[in-house]
Image (cartoon, grey):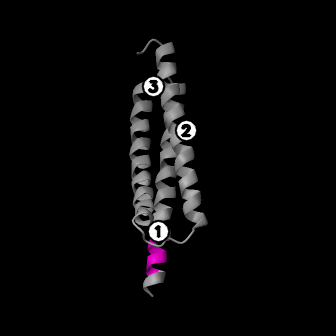
Amino acid sequence: MADKESSNESVKETMEIIINAGDARDFISKALDKVAENDYSAAKELMEEANQKLVAAHRIQTKKLQKEAEGDAVEYSVLFTHAQDTVMTIMSEYNLSKKLIDIFERKEGKR
């Protein structure tokens, strides 16, 4: 029974990674919409929200990876692999979007 509970907890944590990363993607998308409206202040606020979600996702991911690094047996999970891929992809989107906001803000002479 403990193994099933452990497995359920692992799935729950993995889903939290995916959900937080997905929320970050939504904030990034909204931030870029604000850039299109030349509202850089709102865009930056939304990017901060995205960052908070990515930090939350990354902390959960790191906790899971640390367990394995400490010698705990960890079963391979396609779902966790997907979660890691999702976080990595959205972090790239985040970094690119931050750079785009900076570029557009400079072009507008707002910075």
Q: Position of residue 44 (x, y in %)?
A: 41, 31
Identify the residue under disc 2: 93
- The residue under the point 45% across, 11% down is 109
Q: Is residue 54 above or below residue 102?
A: below
Front residue of 95 and 111: 95
- The residue under the point 47% across, 68% down is 12
- The residue under the point 43% across, 71% down is 72
Q: Can see residue 107? A: yes
Front residue of 103 and 2: 2
- Element class at badge 2: helix
Which is nearer the N-term, disc 2 or disc 1?
Answer: 1
- The residue under the point 45% across, 57% down is 61
Q: What segment carries the magenta color? A: 5-10
Q: Position of residue 71 (x, y in %)?
A: 42, 69
The amino acid at mark 2 is Glu
Front residue of 68 and 47: 68
Which is nearer the N-term, disc 3 or disc 2?
Answer: 3
